[in-house]
Image: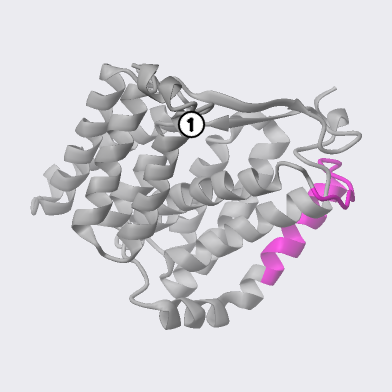
Amino acid sequence: MLSLFESLNCEHPEHFAYTAVIFAYLLVWKKKAVYWQFSLIAYLIFGYLTNCFQVLGVLLIVSFWGGVVLMSRVQSVLASFCMGVLILAWIVLAKLHMLPGFNNLIMYSGLQLSIEAIPYTLYLNFETPIIGVLLLAYIVPKASNFKAYIRALRNSWQIMSYGVVTVMMLAMILGFVGIDLKYPEILFVWVILNIITVITEETIFRGWLLRVLLNYTSPALSIMCVSILFGILHFSGGALYMLLAMISGVFYSWVYVKTKSIEASSTLHFLLNFIHIMIFTYPALASVYS
């Protein structure tokens, strides 16, 4: 399957697949239905041809695509709930990288980005990016234009400021990070992959789950439930990391409740991550895990 790409001297043919899904994200915001669908189909084709995922992986993606479309169209509350449970189960398994048929790649391994930090590994994951694209396409509301996005930022900049200061100060007090100004060599790649990760997570937790819960419970309870789940799904980083993720989730959710803008909550999420890698120990002090 790789012979064509090898003949073209493509050192990393799997990048074709990831580029296709990046274009899908850009086009879904432009509301160009046909074009983002073509990009997602290209993602499936390139991903399969470059062994990023196997036939089973393709089938799982197609089944998720169909499930999201069905959930967006059913009228029955019970049917919608059942489809939502199945979709959530698929997402959780994908976030935990427990779905079969996917061959995620290690882009960088054992990097020492900060002197006293644990080694950092950057993965190219292929099962999670499509989640955000499909939820944005069929379920999660998007900003109508750039002015709406700017208005959301103006309405939430104070919450964003509180969030960044609170989370990073708490991370320092708890000994999770220290001050470490730097310009990582992997920054460009990190930014691209982190933006995709951030949009995917915000689409799941704020754009979908939080928005649904707000229809049935109070904002405070909705924020608490979503933030706890958000923290739990970061368990791989340990208890302290889960706590910080949970607190961060509260601020992301607060921004979404305030603005109803997935773009605003994504901005805060990425801003916090960017400040973390540029100014503080990244990903965390080794002493936390000793």
Closest to the observer, 189 or 280: 189
Q: Position of residue 8 (x, y in %)?
A: 43, 27
Name the residue at 33% across, 37% down.
43
- Mark 1: secondary structure: loop
Name the residue at 70% across, 69% down.
162
Give the answer, above or below, for where 116 lies relative to 197.
Answer: above
Q: Position of residue 221 (x, y in %)?
A: 46, 57
Residue 128 falls within the magenta-colored stretch: no
Three-letter amino acid code of the residue under disc 1: Asn
Give the answer, above or below, for where 37 lies relative to 55.
Answer: below
Closest to the observer, 64 or 35: 35
Left or right of 285, for residue 195: left
Name the residue at 60% across, 63% down.
268
Give the answer, above or below, for where 58 lies relative to 31.
Answer: above
Residue 167 falls within the magenta-colored stretch: yes
Left or right of 231, for residue 113: right
State how the image is colored.
one colour
Tell me how many marks there are. Answer: 1
Question: Badge 1: few (under 14), some or many (20 or more) residues near its Cα, within 10 Å?
Answer: many
Q: Position of residue 269 (x, y in %)?
A: 59, 57
Closest to the observer, 3 or 149: 3
Q: Which residue, given by chain and number where applicable, does mark 1 sit on?
A: 125
Q: Can you see residue 89?
A: no
- The magenta segment is 161-183
Q: Position of residue 279 (x, y in %)?
A: 82, 54
Q: Residue furthest left?
A: 75
Quadrant of image for the N terminus: top left
Name the residue at 64% across, 38% down.
242
Image quadrant in which you'd find residue 218: bottom left
Left or right of 289, for residue 24: left
